[in-house]
Image (spheres, rainbow, N blue to C red):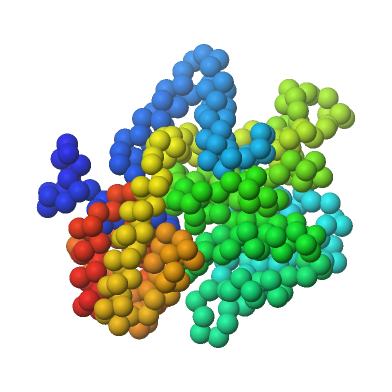
């Protein structure tokens, strides 16, 4: 229970121990904002008039515009997907066959597992070799130099993970993209674990495409994925999954005269899902209004406190110590998975919320997290 000041019965600020910005992401007033947006949609959609599609598609366009603004994306280069996996699949299935057939798709071993599952399944169908750059023995992340060493002119496509979900390692995008350009490869970036905390400029990075979700630092809803593709790549793509929204004129009903839209809309297909857009727009609007320098500085200070506590407790840091090499999360290796679950249970009892992958504790301080919440985490670490 919380009162009108947003404090719990214990007197704590609501969400002050929330450390799950690598997972869902929360911001002040999220529940009421989302409820209001979904209620407005329900009232429009349930009204006996003809205003539904204008409203629904307007919400979807607002979602696209906010993401495009965030990523400084070229006009009409970003569209909605259900998630990062479907976005990557759509891109691969749209490329000219010669881009991948008989060539290599390169990915790091600490990529998001769902994407590796997808690539493993597509390799035989599309005739490419999947090359996975493995972690060094005892390492927590893949080193950039190992990716570069595995990346030659035979690589048709490389998928880079900007920030790893298992270590918070932040790759050197500038160096990796520059190397990839020399090899003549298509380059994609999974920006999921960093979008909304670090600046990503599509034109400055100059990758060929980017994929993300509206969860995590973006604080939106599930189902709100995005696919951003640079215009010169769009022009060469012919998506396999296509429909009436893939056309320049969606109301063209001549079944023998299909033609792809000239921009990112060719990656659309049938009637688009809009519910995730409706649910996420309030979070994206809140996000756009924040002082991100201030938010990042707060994250850095709180991450430093977590690292210092792990050091004092003699625990192994599973993230880069250098902030320039690290995303917004701190991962700590405990003795085993049972120890991690026991610690999580204790943290819940003091209203601190993190998670674990096996023996790796994952902590991501963000917008709601306070120094008091960090203090309860560090106290628990000292006893682990």
Q: Residue furthest left?
A: 10
Q: Residue at x 69, y 71 (%)?
A: 148
Answer with left or right where residue 311 lies relative to residue 99: left
Answer with left or right where residue 28 lies relative to residue 150: left
- Relative to 371, say whether 282 is above or below: above
Q: Residue at x 87, y 30 (%)?
A: 256
Can you tell which quarter of the image residue 31 is in?
top left
- Residue 170 in percent (x, y) is at 52, 64
Looking at the picture, tell me which residue is in the foreground, 187 or 45: 187
Can you tell which quarter of the image residue 79 is in?
top right
- Relative to 312, say whether 196 is above or below: above
The C terminus, quarter of image: bottom left
Q: Residue at x 57, y 74 (%)?
A: 142
Can you tell which quarter of the image residue 68 is in?
top right
- Residue 239 in percent (x, y) is at 76, 45
- Relative to 351, say whether 206 is above or below: above
- Residue 224 in percent (x, y) is at 52, 44
Answer with left or right where residue 309 lies relative to residue 5: right
Asked whether residue 29 is in view, the answer is yes
Asked whether residue 223 is in view, the answer is no
Q: Residue at x 73, y 31 (%)?
A: 244
């Amino acid at each position: 229970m919380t009162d009108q000041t947003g404090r719990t019965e214990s007197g704590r600020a609501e969400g002050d121990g929330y450390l799950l910005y690598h997972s869902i992401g929360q911001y002040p007033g999220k529940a009421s904002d989302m409820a209001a947006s979904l209620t407005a949609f329900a009232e429009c959609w349930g009204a006996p008039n003809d205003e539904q599609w204008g409203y629904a598609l307007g919400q979807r366009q607002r979602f696209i515009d906010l993401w495009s603004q965030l990523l400084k994306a070229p006009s009409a280069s970003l569209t909605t997907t259900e998630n990062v996996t479907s976005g990557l699949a759509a891109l691969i299935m749209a490329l000219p066959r010669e881009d991948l057939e008989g060539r290599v798709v390169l990915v790091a071993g600490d990529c998001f597992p769902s994407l590796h599952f997808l690539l493993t399944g597509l390799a035989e169908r599309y005739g490419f070799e999947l090359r996975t750059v493995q972690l060094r023995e005892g390492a927590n992340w893949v080193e950039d130099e190992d990716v570069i060493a595995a990346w030659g002119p035979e690589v048709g496509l490389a998928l880079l993970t900007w920030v790893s979900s298992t270590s918070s390692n932040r790759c050197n995008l500038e160096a990796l993209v520059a190397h990839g350009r020399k090899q003549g490869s298509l380059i994609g970036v999974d920006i999921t674990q960093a979008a909304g905390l670090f600046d990503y400029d599509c034109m400055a990075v100059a990758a060929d495409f980017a994929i993300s979700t509206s969860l995590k630092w973006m604080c939106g809803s599930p189902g709100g994925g995005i696919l951003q593709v640079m215009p010169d790549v769009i022009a060469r793509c012919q998506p396999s999954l296509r429909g009436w929204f893939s056309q320049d004129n969606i109301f063209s009903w001549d079944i023998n005269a299909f033609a792809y839209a000239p921009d990112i809309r060719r990656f659309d297909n049938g009637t688009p899902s809009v519910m995730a857009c409706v649910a996420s727009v309030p979070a994206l609007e809140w996000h756009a209004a924040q002082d991100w320098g201030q938010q990042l500085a707060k994250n850095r200070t709180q991450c430093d406190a977590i690292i210092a506590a792990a050091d004092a407790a003699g625990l192994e840091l599973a993230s880069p110590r250098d902030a320039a090499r690290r995303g917004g999360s701190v991962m700590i290796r405990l003795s085993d998975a049972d120890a991690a679950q026991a610690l999580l249970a204790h943290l819940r009892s003091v209203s601190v919320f993190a998670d674990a992958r096996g023996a790796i504790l994952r902590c991501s301080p963000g917008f709601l997290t306070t120094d008091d919440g960090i203090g309860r985490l560090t106290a628990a670490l000292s006893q682990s």
